[in-house]
Image (spheres, helix red, strand yellow):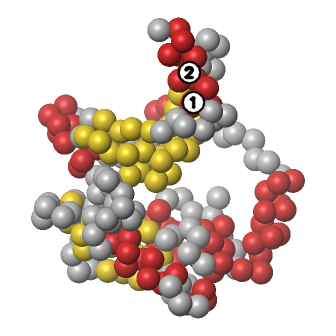
Amino acid sequence: MPYQDVRDYIDELTRRDLLHVIDETVSKDTELVPLVRLQFRGLAEEHRKAFWFRSITDARGRDYDGSVLLGSLGCSRAVYAAAMGTDTDGIREKWASAHGNHLPPNEISPADAPVKEIVIPGPDLEGGVDRFPHLISTPGFDPAPFITAGVWVTRDPETGAYNLGIYRGMVKAPDRIGCATDVSTQHLAIQWEKARRMG
């Protein structure tokens, strides 16, 4: 893996001049995504960059304690290559190498696991998912903020087997995210239907 964390990757994007850093306050609901999308309307691919917004507000004027990195994986071949730790000429070779050389899992003890750097305790959880600046991808068309590529962990009610799937989730309330199960062949829909039948 070329990067230990997102901070390392931001440093590499900066080094390669593939990052716009925006310090002006930007609304996550009306301005952020449209600003990034502008580069896809006529700007040559070699000029496209990732965006790092470091001062976020929403349409109601609420400020967020955090930042948003957008377009950081696939807005151009150069950015995609940076994410893979190579240059544009090395993308194909990197994929070929990955397909032929799977890495075995590296098990570590729970005490040494690099997780839970930030723990949000009891009363601070009251804000729910609203404490994070979830984006409105298409202002005027999306009815709410969405988690575009969230990983949903589900368990089959019959077999007990777990499944991880990437689904778009609509933020409906601080404590509720909705997910469409309208594609009947997706595991989430299959498991939901089993659970529904089981009562």
Q: Is residue 199 above or below residue 58?
A: above
The residue beneath circle 2 is 193
Q: Position of residue 42 (x, y in %)?
A: 53, 90
x 53%, y 28%: residue = 154
x 29%, y 57%: residue = 133
Is residue 108 at least partly visible in the picture? no
x 51%, y 70%: residue = 72
Who is closer to the viewer here, 173 or 9? Answer: 173
x 37%, y 46%: residue = 170
Who is closer to the viewer here, 121 or 20? Answer: 20
Q: CA distance from mark 2 to mark 1?
A: 6 Å
> Label 1: how many residues lie within 10 Å, few (<14), some (14-19) or many (20+)?
some
Q: Are circles 2 and 1 on residues that touch, CB within 8 Å?
A: yes
Q: Position of residue 111 (x, y in %)?
A: 46, 33
Q: Which circle marks residue 43 in the picture?
A: none
| Quadrant of the image containing the N terminus | bottom right
Q: Amino acid at mark 1?
A: Ala
> Label 2: how many residues lie within 10 Å, few (<14), some (14-19) or many (20+)?
some
Q: Secondary structure at mark 1?
A: helix
Count of numbered tags: 2
Quarter assignment of residue 86: bottom right
Q: Position of residue 129 (x, y in %)?
A: 28, 44
Q: Position of residue 121 (x, y in %)?
A: 22, 35
Q: Which circle marks residue 189 in the picture?
A: 1
Left or right of 171 in this view: 123? left
Who is closer to the viewer here, 28 or 91? Answer: 28
